[in-house]
Image (tube, rainbow, N blue to C red):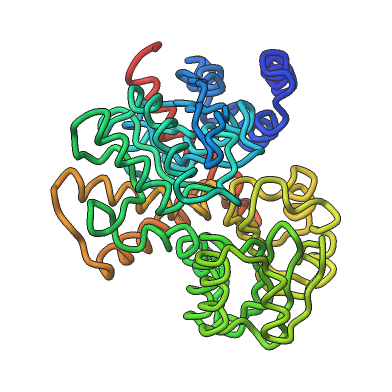
Amino acid sequence: MNEADFIERVRARNPNEPEYLQAVEEVVASLWPFLQDEGRRYLDAGVLERLTEGDRAISFRVAWIDDQGEVQTNRGYRIQWCGVLGPYKGGLRFHPSVNFAISKFLAFEQTFKNALTTLPLGGAKGGADFDPKGKSDEEVMRFCQSFMTELSRYIGPDVDVPAGDIGVGGREIGYLFGQYRRMTGRFEGALTGKGVGWGGSEIRTEATGYGAIFFAQEMFAARDEGLEGKTVGISGAGNVAQYAAEKAIALGAKVVTMSDSSGFIHDPAGIDRDKLEWIKALKNDRRGRIREYAEQFDAEYHEGKKPWSVAMDLALPCATQNELGREDAEALVKNECAAIVEGANMPCTAAAAKLIRERGLLYAPGKAANAGGVATSGLEMTQNSQRMYWGRERVEDELHEIMRDIHRACCEHGKGEDGQIDYVRGANIAGFIRVADAMIAQGAI
């Protein structure tokens, strides 16, 4: 069987699932030369076939009552993809775009991401097609309680430990954990992203954004450069974008763009700490639109557009999957952008990623660069198991070291004959080896 035959088999078994197929094809393209050479034993053991089939997929109805007393119905998902390395681990996403195919793609990617952290974590993902935007706290609470009533039978600290993702922040995790405790009668680490006062970890909120910047820092350091003085463009204005901006600013970079679904702002003077705090209040407390920043600080606002036409040294797509297309990549290349680091899950389309790699830009895939969130979730699980609390400095040091280790693994497996690092190939091979070795050791299950 050749690569094309294998991909065709996956396509036939998973029709009408473009995001999942995109993720599989990207991984297989990286792995195939390795599998034909030193990794032949993995092909002989059927590891790739097993790894492209999840362990189980759970779909369920979520009925809840809105503030008008009317019953609303959404659909919930939990995809437990691969548990050979430890309890399933991966976020919950509440967004109208959530469906079975997107949940599968996220769970597949999460398996590699978790493996790269070297923590004992399997891969999973899930969520619902519920949109928290515009809902009252009471409506969000009722939805979360209904969602967890069903999900609670499938999760636990040694089984599956969900976390937050798009649309699932501290408020939602609190409601979900409260209902889990009600359903099971147990106070245990069945969710991560909890409040620090009740079992959560320091910097869990900041971790994905911080981790992406730590990874970018390592990429530039490999070229004997730093982030100080670099111009940084960021998409998104949510959790990941906010804290990527925060850490970039702390390291001396100049952040010039942020965005939301309505458009993006460009501040040539730079978004400093005070301006960033204003954005946090805008998005987290008032739930306003990013265009208000332009009015407040006399910056440029571009309705309905993405920030990739702006000149920048480092691009950080932190919003959602497939947000950066080929034309955007061409604009980044034209403006001599040096690096693209994915803060979101698969934010570059396949065509964009292909162009970026062909042009030799530094390119960090999300499975490596945005692993900081799940890494810190793993550290939260450790603290829960020990009934311990670690201070902020210790957690951040642990996170930084994990991101360094992921970078080292990408370099080890992605270094070409010309000395250049293909981070996509390196991340895929490093993650695959760890999962595949555990699969073979545990037998044909």
How many labels sit on residues? 0
Q: Is the C terminus in the top left, top right, bottom left or bottom right quadrant?
A: top left
Q: Against 433, is 54 above or below?
A: above
Place of residue 234 in the rendered image (x, y in percent of width and height, measured from the top left):
65, 67
Could you say which quadrant of the image residue 308 lies in? Answer: bottom right
Nearest to the observer: residue 329 or residue 138: 138
Q: Is the N terminus in the top left, top right, bottom left or bottom right quadrant?
A: top right
Q: Against 201, is 339 above or below?
A: below
Residue at far front of view:
68
In the rendered image, is residue 419 in sight?
no
Could you say which quadrant of the image residue 397 lies in? Answer: bottom left
Could you say which quadrant of the image residue 183 lies in? Answer: top left
Nearest to the observer: residue 171 or residue 364: 171
In the rendered image, is residue 200 in sight?
yes
Residue at far top of view:
444
Nearest to the observer: residue 99 or residue 120: 99
The residue depicted at 56 percent of the width and 60 percent of the height is: 238
The residue depicted at 56 percent of the width and 48 percent of the height is: 135
246 with respect to 267 (left or right) = left
Q: Against 205, is 409 above or below?
A: above
Place of residue 304 in the rendered image (x, y in percent of width and height, measured from the top left):
82, 60
The residue depicted at 52 percent of the width and 28 percent of the height is: 76
282 with respect to 170 (left or right) = right
The residue depicted at 52 percent of the width and 85 percent of the height is: 274
Place of residue 64 in the rendered image (x, y in percent of width and height, measured from the top left):
49, 31
Q: Against 18, is 212 above or below?
A: below
